[in-house]
Image (tube, helix red, strand yellow):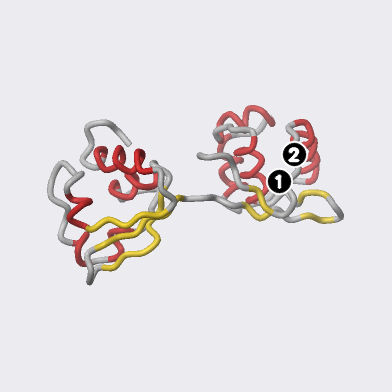
Amino acid sequence: MKPGSKYYPLYQRFSQIGAETFTLTIDEIQAHVESQLPTTARTKTSWWANRRKGGYQSQAWIKAGYRVAQVELAQQRVTFKKFQAEYKIQREAGAIKWDQAAIRALRLHMNLTQSQFAEAIGVRRQTISEWENGVYAPDRSTMKHLGLVAEKEAFAPANYYIPPAAE
C-alpha cells in the first residue's frame, strides 16, 4: 500500500484498530478515503472481496491484517476480522508430507520471502511459487532436503501451523 494512494488513509486507519473484529458503516469507511467510493461499494458485495491482486481497496484491509467477514448492503455496513492464516500439516510415517501448505508454513516459520527461501534451499523463486500453489510437488531428494532444513530450523508443528503475525 503506497502512501498517497486513494486507499492509503483507510489502510492507516485499519492498521491502528487492533480489534479482532469490528464493523464499520460504508459512510464511516468513505470518511477515510480521499475521494468518493464507487457506487458498486454500496451495491455489490463483490467490491468487498478479499483479493490479494487487483482491487486496490482490498489491499487497505489485507495489508493491515484484516479480511472482510460479512457485508450487509441493506444496512450499509461491513464487518472485518483479523486474518489468521493456518496451514494444515500432514504426515506420512511420522514425517512431514511436503505439500504446498507445509512448504509455505516452513518458509513463513523461517520468516523468509519466496526469493530468500529459494536461495536458502538452492532452487528458483518460481519453483517455490509453483510448490506453494500446488502446480507440482518437490522430488524425493528435495523433500529430504526440506526435512533437514525443517529440523535445523526447529520446525516441528503437530497438525497445524499458525505463522507469527504477518506474511
Q: What is the residue that sits farthest to the left in this orientation?
A: 36
Which is nearer the eye, 58 or 163?
A: 163
Disc 1 marks a residue whose amino acid type is Pro
Q: Residue at x 19, y 44 (%)?
A: 33
Q: Which quadrant of the rendered structure holds the N terminus?
A: top left
Q: How far from the left and from the top, in percent, is residue 68?
A: 37, 57
Q: Residues within 10 Å of mark 2 (few under 14, many from 20)?
A: some
- Based on the displayed image, in which of its 4 quarters is residue 81 positioned? bottom left
- Between circles 1 and 2, the one closer to the viewer is 2
Q: How far from the left and from the top, in percent, is residue 155?
A: 73, 39
Q: Residue at x 36, y 54 (%)?
A: 22
- Based on the displayed image, in which of its 4 quarters is residue 18 positioned? top left
Q: Residue at x 23, y 58 (%)?
A: 25
Labels 1 & 2 near each other (Cβ < 8 A):
yes
Label ID, residue 110: none
Location of residue 48 with respect to 36 vertically, above or below:
below
Residue 77 lies left or right of residue 158; in this view the side is left
Residue 42 lies left or right of residue 132; in this view the side is left
Provide the secondary structure element on which disc 2 rests. helix
Q: Residues within 10 Å of mark 1 (few under 14, many from 20)?
A: some
Disc 2 marks a residue whose amino acid type is Leu
**Mark closest to the chain's N terminus, 1 or 2:** 1
Q: Which residue is mark 1?
A: 138
Q: Which residue is mark 2?
A: 146
